[in-house]
Amino acid sequence: MGTLGDYPVYVRAGALIPLVKDTKVSNIIPDSADRKTMFTWFAPTAAADVNNKATFELRQSVTEGTGITATAYFSSATTIEATISATKSATGFEIVGINEPSNVDLDSWLLSGCAYVYVDHIKTLSVSCLHTDGGVAIHIEGVTSSVF
């Protein structure tokens, strides 16, 4: 009997799902936490516009906080806007199935430790933060799908 990692999992294009990453992302942020919630948007489409945002609300225990909300949408044919609400937890955003964007701007508190990396062989943009006490807004330009 294998582990969950041994089985293929299929998701619908445009799904926004929180996934817990158990590994350090030392190539992005050297002092990163061992576990973080990465909101992962799979093969986003322009159908997710300002009136039809991809949204996920993650509940937390009372001792950890009030919860986290992540949203993402296309503000134009080649521009994505994404946000993660304020939390003290290590968190981030991954967008799977896009070609390398021409520009990525992160708007967060200076000490939140946010950084990004694009990995071409898996067509994924990853934004990782040690915490998002003031929330984080992500503006991505020059986005084209590598899936459709």
Image (spheres, rainbow, N blue to C red):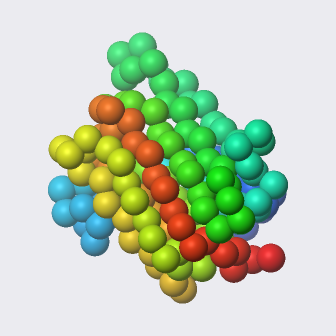
- Say if residue 33 shows up in the picture: no
Q: In this view, does 42 lie above or below 18?
A: below
* Residue farthest toward the bottom in the current orientation of the protein: 121
Q: Is residue 55 above or below residue 93?
A: above
Tell me what residue is drawn at x 75 percent, y 77 percent: 147
Q: Is residue 47 above or below residue 58?
A: below
User: Percent x, y for residue 9?
Assistant: 73, 62
In depth, the one of 56 and 51 nearer the eye is: 51
Tell me what residue is drawn at x 32 percent, y 32 percent: 134
* Residue farthest toward the top in the current orientation of the protein: 62
In depth, the one of 143 and 12 nearer the eye is: 143
User: Percent x, y for residue 110?
Assistant: 20, 46
User: Percent x, y for residue 103?
Assistant: 45, 71
In depth, the one of 114 and 20 nearer the eye is: 114
- Say if residue 132 shows up in the picture: yes
Tell me what residue is drawn at x 36 percent, y 16 percent: 63
The C terminus: image quadrant:
bottom right
In depth, the one of 145 and 23 nearer the eye is: 145
The N terminus: image quadrant:
bottom right
Tell me what residue is drawn at x 53 percent, y 79 percent: 100
